[in-house]
Image: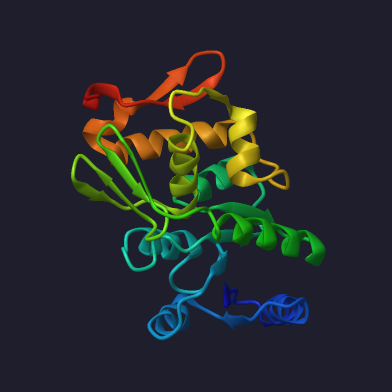
Amino acid sequence: MIYYVEDNEGIRNLVTYTLNMTGFEAEGFADGEAFFKALETTFPELVLLDVMLPGEDGVSILGRLRHDARFSGIPVIMITAKGEESDKVEGLECGADDYVTKPFGMMELIARVKAVLRRSSGRGEGALVLGGIRLDREKHTVEADGQEVVLTFREFELLRFLMEHPEKAFDRDRLLDEVWGAEYDGGPRTVDMHVQTIRKKLGKCASQIETIYGLGYKIGEGNHAQ
């Protein structure tokens, strides 16, 4: 199930119709109130979220999702008429997994949806433990120094990829390809922002993610090495 929050009825109907005709199940909502009411009964695989909405705007709705443990792992693609870099940065910093600006082609949107869904499923089973960090790929949970850490979908995927390759350094372009996909048109700054946010959430374990100057990042055991 894909939820689309968009106050423009014409756009909302076109997008949900296209999604349903291409093999997905989709439902649209005109505002945040109706969206959150639906969340109480059906858990979507993906949310498409417009920024400019009546009442509560999309950025605020995204913030509520990311701070609620029940919904924090749901992938979110922001869809908005705003196309300035600062607007994209704001959406990504708030936890969006991708960003599509209006006007957009239906096939482009479908490709973005498929890319995000591919990365939200089938990422392997079991837990990864490195230093003070424990990541459970099946339960989609993370603990740092014994404390639960709530990550967005994309933050989880970035941490997962690094933990699956301990002590191996990756440049930002490789991380973009592996975590965001070849379809993503954002720049290396996206990786930096996500690493910064993950470090804040990891607390004492933040130092396990090392910056390799002139290249990118790697993860090690840090001060928790046995």
- Please give left or right for residue 156 compared with residue 100 in the image: left
Query: Which residue is rendered at x = 61% and y = 45% of the image?
Result: 180
Name the quarter where the N terminus is drawn.
bottom right
Name the quarter where the C terminus is drawn.
top left
Q: Residue furthest top?
A: 214
Q: Nearer the viewer, residue 102 or 54?
A: 102
Q: Nearer the viewer, residue 71 or 209?
A: 209
Give the vertical position of 29 relative to 69 (above or below).
Answer: below
Q: Nearer the viewer, residue 31 or 98?
A: 98
Query: Which residue is rendered at x = 48% and y = 25% of the image?
Result: 217
Query: Which residue is rendered at x = 77% and y = 76% of the image?
Result: 22
Tell me, what colour scheme is on the image? rainbow
Rendered image quadrant of residue 84: top right
The picture places residue 10, in percent across and down from the top left corner, at 72, 81
Give the vertical position of 113 relative to 196 (above or below).
Answer: below
The picture places residue 75, in percent across and down from the top left corner, at 52, 60
Rendered image quadrant of residue 174: top right
The picture places residue 52, in percent across and down from the top left corner, at 56, 65
The picture places residue 146, in percent across and down from the top left corner, at 18, 45
- Please give left or right for residue 154 compared with residue 71 in the image: right
Give the vertical position of 92 relative to 221 (above or below).
Answer: below
Total tally of numbered discs in the picture: 0
